Amino acid sequence: MLIQNDEITPVKAPTLHRRDFLKLAGAGLSGLLLASSGLSSIAAALEAPKQDASLKTLPELGVPKRFPLIENGIDGLSAKQIQAHLKLYEGYVKKYQSIRQELLAFSPEQLTNVNATYHPFRELLVEESFALNGILLHEEYFGVLTPEAKPMSVYLKSLLAKHFGSIEGFQAQLVASAKAMRGWAILGYCPRYKNLSFYGLDAHHTFSPMGVHPVLVVDVYEHAYLIDYGTDRSAYLNALWKQIDWTLVEARLSSI
Ligand SMILES: [Fe+2]
């Protein structure tokens, strides 16, 4: 195991509640936690009313994000590997925009004979989910990679240990999920059941649980590591574990 965490005591039947998080942030543990991960602003944001989401125009949908921290390579993932991967991601952004344009171009008359066996509108709907999830998942994946180690806070360690029995249990679930799937392993939070769990996707739009917020996303398609590791997924996962910014993982979790 890559994490040593002997001080954490496993707790059974855990659940994650936002109020519990805020309670923790306000209790004795808070000084260290707030200082280490900027949670004071997150806690304040949680209490503020949600802002209205602004509608994006089609041209804006075609603009890929930049990931300057990692685009020149990081330990364990070369610049060649990451840039090839980013190019793939940018392709999804462009394709999503063109699919949206094609969907909106159908006239009401053209939509009268749509059916679930075959129709161009149906095919575009299917690929819209594939392209959009291709964007969202890649942005979550690239977004927590870091050139410098950003270890877990005491709070995050404690939270994960509560949900998975121990940090070793969490890491074992992560690695097993990443080895079991053909596309993605996701640590996700389900607001309905207030549960933190791993989910697996064989493709961008296959087995996507509704309403689950991705907290940590691991790309296990071979295109994510083939240049650097061939087909050695275990070596890729070992390298990846060391390059995760756990402070961002914690911030994502607390912002849900
Ligand atoms: Fe990918």
Image (cartoon, rainbow, N blue to C red):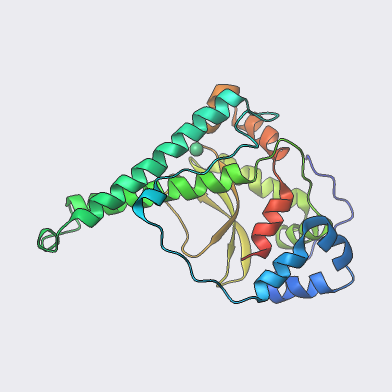
> 59 and 46: which one is in front?
59
Indicate the position of residue 189 as horizontal and vertical percent values. 60, 62
* 179 relative position to 98: left or right: right
> 103 and 27: which one is in front?
103
* 178 relative position to 60: left or right: right
Q: Quadrant of the N terminus?
A: top right
Indicate the position of residue 19 as horizontal and vertical percent values. 71, 76
Indicate the position of residue 241 as horizontal and vertical percent values. 70, 39
Q: How many marks?
A: 0
Which residue: 24% across, 54% down? Answer: 103
Above or below 36: residue 194: below
* 112 relative position to 148: left or right: left
> 235 and 211: which one is in front?
211
Above or below 223: residue 14: below
* 217 relative position to 36: left or right: left
Which residue: 30% across, 45% down? Answer: 98
Indicate the position of residue 80 as horizontal and vertical percent values. 56, 23
Which residue: 27% across, 51% down? Answer: 101
Residue 230 visible somewhere in the drawing? no
Q: Name the image quarter holding residue 146.
A: top right
Q: Quadrant of the C terminus?
A: bottom right
Which residue: 64% across, 75% down? Answer: 48
Residue 182 visible somewhere in the drawing? yes
